[in-house]
Image: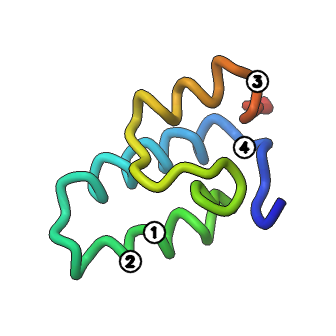
Amino acid sequence: MKGKNVFTKSECNALRKLIILRCAAPSNRQKNIRDQMRAIGFYGRDDFGITGMTVDIFDGLIRDGKITIKG
């Protein structure tokens, strides 16, 4: 695992906001947003094999126990 799979509630909320931004951003801004997600420790493709991350997919990772929320 390149990143982590245990996040705080505030990290999960920040990731959700970044995912929404990335989905709406033009391609020339998406890399910067992904870098912000990686700074939190989330590597969608490397750790979970997901390239088109959405909030629904992210929440599914939580529901399936692949991501754990602490605190």
Asked if the residue at tag 1 contacts the one at tag 2, i.e. Cβ–Cβ closer than 8 Å, the answer is yes
Task: Quarter of the image for the N terminus: give it.
Answer: bottom right
Image location of residue 17, percent across then percent down = 37, 47
Mark 3 / mark 1, whichever is N-terminal: 1
Tag 3: amino acid: Gly
Query: What element does badge 3 sit on?
Result: loop
Disc tally is 4
Query: What element does badge 1 sit on?
Result: helix
Q: What is the C-alpha distance between the residues marked 3 and 2? A: 27 Å
Q: Which residue corresponds to mark 3? A: 65
Between 46 and 15, the one lying in front of the other is 46
Mark 3 / mark 2, whichever is N-terminal: 2
Q: Pointer 3: residues within 10 angstroms few (<14), some, or many (20+)?
A: few
Position of 49 with respect to 16 (left or right) is right
Measuring 49% from the left and 40% from the top, which residue is drawn there?
A: 13
Asked if the residue at tag 1 contacts the one at tag 3, i.e. Cβ–Cβ closer than 8 Å, the answer is no
Q: Which residue corresponds to mark 2? A: 31
Q: Quadrant of residue 47?
A: bottom right
Disc 1 or disc 4, which is closer to the eye?
1
Q: What is the C-alpha distance between the residues marked 3 and 1? A: 22 Å
Image location of residue 60, percent across then percent down = 56, 24
Does residue 61 sit above or below 18 in this rendering? above
Q: What is the C-alpha distance between the residues marked 4 and 2? A: 21 Å
Does residue 2 sit above or below 10 in this rendering? below
Does residue 15 sit above or below 33 in this rendering? above
Mark 4 / mark 2, whichever is N-terminal: 4
Residue 34, labelled with which disc? 1
Task: Quarter of the image for the C terminus: give it.
Answer: top right
Q: What is the C-alpha distance between the residues marked 1 and 4? A: 16 Å
